[in-house]
Image: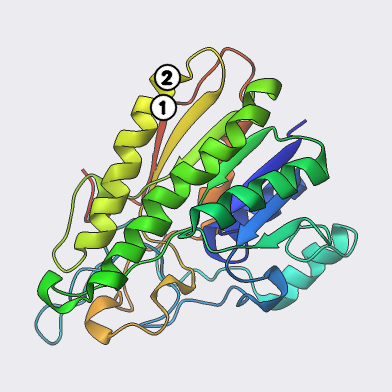
């Protein structure tokens, strides 16, 4: 039994796919997101310049296909459609995205106070926590000299400090349940790209934080580091063309990555999945 699983960024992308997967596996997804699940965009088929997660290489000379810094399945595959989402919601007792009414809190993870209050509210409402998955993430592409300091720092506050704030607030509940944590880094936290300094710095921080946390909590709380590459999600929406993947880019369906999260969460006591790298055979940012 999975129990109560807190998921940040659970209104879209990998977080939404993880909420679906947790609900299907018999768990109760609890979502924190800056957007309410009902207002989040549904999954869509990949189109050039749309719906890919991770960070992108700036597009090279005309005629060549830019590849993002993360993994994925072939671009011809389609993610789950909105009608399929609706069917899954119906199978979960009318819950939107696998999340029961009232099991989500809107909060900005760049604000530590909001993050901590959201964790406590959901944990108390559900009667405790059995795991936390920190899939929330943002990016701001561009040369360092051209990215406003506030925008650059917000990426670090959400991706790294937001991860820390949520886990710190959840620890009393997780130690009580001897639960688990799955942090979501990126292949760009291990192999950086230009024009993505904020994202690479934040995700490298998540890698270091998670490895240290695993040592600190050994024998008390299970800790897994997930290192995904790009996924077919709305992560690239609204970006300049040079920072979007080409039409032939290899991209993972978020549902496939979410399945690895559930795998880590369902290991028996004493069995720890310390690190998972999820990427396609033609991944450009791994190893």
The reply to whether discs 1 and 2 touch (Cβ–Cβ < 8 Å) is yes
Compared across the picture, whether 27 is left or right of 227 comes to right
The answer to whether residue 13 shows anywhere in this view is: yes
Q: Nearer the viewer, residue 45 or 209?
A: 209
* C-alpha distance separating marks 1 and 2: 5 Å
The answer to whether residue 256 shows anywhere in this view is: no
Residue density around tag 2, few if under 14, some if 14–19, many if 20 or more, within 10 Å:
few
As helix, strand or loop, the secondary structure at mark 1 comes to helix
Q: Nearer the viewer, residue 256 or 33?
A: 33
User: Quadrant location of residue 114?
Assistant: bottom right
Whether residue 213 is situated above or below residue 25 in the rendered picture = above
Q: Residue at x 50, y 60 (%)?
A: 253
- How far across and how far down the image is residue 88, in percent? 78, 63
Q: Which residue is mark 1?
A: 213
Q: Residue at x 50, y 50 (%)?
A: 257
Compared across the picture, whether 254 is left or right of 25 comes to left
- How far across and how far down the image is residue 132, in percent? 59, 40
- How far across and how far down the image is residue 151, in percent? 31, 72
Whether residue 45 is situated above or below residue 161 in the rendered picture = below
Q: Quadrant of the N terminus?
A: top right
Question: Which label is found at residue 216?
Answer: 2
- How far across and how far down the image is residue 172, in percent? 63, 28
Q: Residue at x 53, y 71 (%)?
A: 78
Residue density around tag 1, few if under 14, some if 14–19, many if 20 or more, within 10 Å:
some
Q: Nearer the viewer, residue 108 or 239?
A: 108
As helix, strand or loop, the secondary structure at mark 2 comes to helix
């Amino acid at each position: 039994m999975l129990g109560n699983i807190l998921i940040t960024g659970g209104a879209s992308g990998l977080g939404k796919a993880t909420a679906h997967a947790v609900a299907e596996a018999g768990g109760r997804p609890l979502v924190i997101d800056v957007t309410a699940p009902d207002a989040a965009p549904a999954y869509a088929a990949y189109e050039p310049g749309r719906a890919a997660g991770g960070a992108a290489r700036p597009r090279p000379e005309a005629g060549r296909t830019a590849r993002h810094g993360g993994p994925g399945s072939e671009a011809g595959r389609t993610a789950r459609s909105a009608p399929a989402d609706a069917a899954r919601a119906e199978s979960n007792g009318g819950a939107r995205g696998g999340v029961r009414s009232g099991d989500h809190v809107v909060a900005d993870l760049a604000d530590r106070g909001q993050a901590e209050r959201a964790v406590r509210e959901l944990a108390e409402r559900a009667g405790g926590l059995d795991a936390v998955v920190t899939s929330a993430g943002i990016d701001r592409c561009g040369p360092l000299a051209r990215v406003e300091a506030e925008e650059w720092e917000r990426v670090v506050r959400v991706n790294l400090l937001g991860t820390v704030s949520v886990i710190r607030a959840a620890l009393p509940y997780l130690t009580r349940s001897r639960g688990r944590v799955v942090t979501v880094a990126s292949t760009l936290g291990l192999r950086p790209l230009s024009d993505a300094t904020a994202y690479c710095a934040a995700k490298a921080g998540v890698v270091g934080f998670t490895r240290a946390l695993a040592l600190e909590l050994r024998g008390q709380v299970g800790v897994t580091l997930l290192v995904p590459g790009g996924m077919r999600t709305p992560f690239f929406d609204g970006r300049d063309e040079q920072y979007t993947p080409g039409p032939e880019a290899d991209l993972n369906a978020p549902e496939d990555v979410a399945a690895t999260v559930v795998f880590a969460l369902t290991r028996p006591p004493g069995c720890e999945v310390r690190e998972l790298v999820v990427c396609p055979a033609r991944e450009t940012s791994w190893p």
